[in-house]
Amino acid sequence: MGLRICFVTSHPPSRGRLSEYSVKVLRELGKLPKIERIFVLSDSEPEGINSPYGPRVDVKRVWRADSVASLFKVLLNVLFLRPDVVHFNVHFQSFGRRRLVNFIGLSLPFLCKALRVRSVVSIHNLGEKVELKEVGLKESLLNRLGIRLATKLLTLASTVTVTVRSYAEFLERTYQCTNVEFVPHGTDRIENPPGPAPVNPHRTILMFGHMAPYKGLPLMLEIFTHLMGKMPGLKLVIAGDSHPNFPGYLDHFRRSLPPNVELLGYVPEKRLPELFERAFVVVLPYLTATGTSGVFHLACAFGRPVVASDLPEIRELVKEGASLMLVPPNDVESFCQAIIQLCDEPQLVEDMRTRNLLFASSENWNSVASSFERIYAEVATK
C-alpha cells in the first residue's frame, strides 16, 4: 500500500498565496511510486476547476480565503480521509488578508497534532524576517507576538521544511526546532531555453510577479525614468496582476505610466517563454523579501540575468549557486548602473545565463517532489 497524503494549499484558479508553487509540486508528486493518493484540500473559487494531475490526485475545494469558519473544514476532511500525512504549504499570509484568519490557518498543524495526525509543514517565509509595514501590517507588539506564537505552533509539526536555508538555522536557534529541513523552492526545466535577448536600441526590462507595495513598483518606474535619459528606446514590461492581499493595487498606476511602459496584467504559463524571451534583464526591486523569489527561479530557467535588491533571502540564492547582480534596496542610481553594465558587457550576460541555467537544472521540481516523498515516508513511520 502506498502513502495517502492530504495537501493543504491555495490552488488555481486562485493566484498568489503559493498556488503556482502547489501546481508545480503536485504535477510531480502525482507521478511518484510511493504515493497512492493525494487529496488536495484547497481554497474554493467560483467556477473553479480541477487541474489534470492524473487519477491519483483529487482536488477538494474546502476552504475560502478570509473565512475562519471554512478553515475548520480542513480538519473535518482530514478526520474523514484519515491520511498517513497532512502537508501544509504555507506562508504567514497564506489564508487571506485578515490577521485572525491567518493565525487560525497557521494553527492547523498544531490542531492536527492534537488529533494525533502526522503533519509536514512547508514554510515559505517567516513573519519575523519581514518588514511588516511593507506587507500592509502595523509594526506593533501584538502583531509581533502573534507571528511568534504562530511560528512556534508551526514548528510543532512532525517535520518542517523551508525554502531558504538560513530559515532552518533561525528556527533551530530561536525555537529549538530539531525537525526542520531545507528543501529548495524548485525551478522549471525548460527544454529549449531562449538565447540571450538581441542587443538593439529597443531593449526590454521585465518586472514580473503579483504586484504589491513591497515589490517596489514605484521604485522600478523611477529607475526606468532615469534610464530613459541615457538609453533611448528602452522599454519596461510589467507583467502580473495585483496581489490577492492587495486587490486593485495596479489600478493606481494605470493612468500615470511613463511612455514605453507596458502593463500586461496576468500572464498564463503558456505565454511565459514569449515573455522572458523579450527581456534582456529581469529586475526585482523588492523593499522586503517574503521568502525566496519564485520569479527569480523562473528567470534562471529562461537563462535571463537578474538585478535585485540586496536582501538576505535573495543574497542566499547566490550562495546556492545562482548568478545575479545585487544592489542596495531603494537605491535608484545603483540599479541604473547595474542595468547599464549588463548592456555594455555581453560576456557578463552570457556568464550569468550559463550559471543560472545550471542552477535551474540542479533545483528542478522532480527533485523537490522526491524530497517530499522521502519526508512523507519518514513521517508516516514515526
Image (cartoon, grey):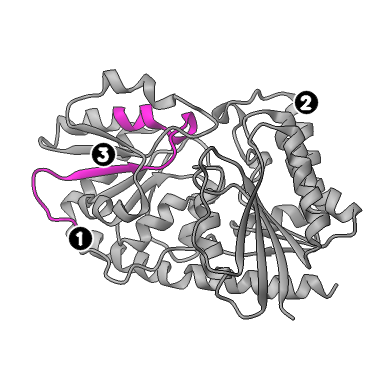
Say which of 56 and 299 sits in front.
Answer: 56
Decide if residue 167 is on the left or right side of residue 344.
right
In primary-sequence order, the first of circles 1 and 3 is 1
CA–CA distance in space, label 3 to label 2: 39 Å
Neighbour class for label 1 at 10 Å: few (<14), some, many (≥20)? Answer: some
Q: Which residue is mark 2?
A: 142
Quarter of image, res 191? bottom left
Which residue range is magenta in the image?
196-221
Decide if residue 252 is on the left or right side of residue 151.
left
- Residue 176 showing in the rendered view: no
Q: Residue 284, percent across and down?
A: 39, 43
The verdict on residue 139 being magenta is no
Neighbour class for label 3 at 10 Å: few (<14), some, many (≥20)? Answer: many
Instruction: Kindly identify the residue that appears in the image at 81 percent across and 49 percent down.
Output: 76
In primary-sequence order, the first of circles 1 and 2 is 2
Instruction: Kindly identify the residue that appears in the image at 53 percent across and 54 percent down.
Output: 50
The answer to the question of whether label 1 and label 2 lie on touching residues, with beta carbons closer than 8 A, is no
Instruction: Kindly identify the residue that appears in the image at 26 percent across and 41 percent down.
Output: 337
CA–CA distance in space, label 1 to label 2: 49 Å
- Residue 144 showing in the rendered view: yes
CA–CA distance in space, label 1 to label 3: 17 Å
Judged from the image, the secondary structure of the residue bearing numbered disc 1 is loop
From the image, state whether disc 3 or disc 2 is nearer to you.
3
The verdict on residue 201 being magenta is yes
Q: Quadrant of the C terminus?
A: bottom right
Amino acid under disc 3? Val
- The mark found on residue 196 in the picture is 1
Q: Which residue is mark 3?
A: 237
Q: Residue 25, percent across and down?
A: 55, 63
Say which of 323 and 146 sits in front.
Answer: 146
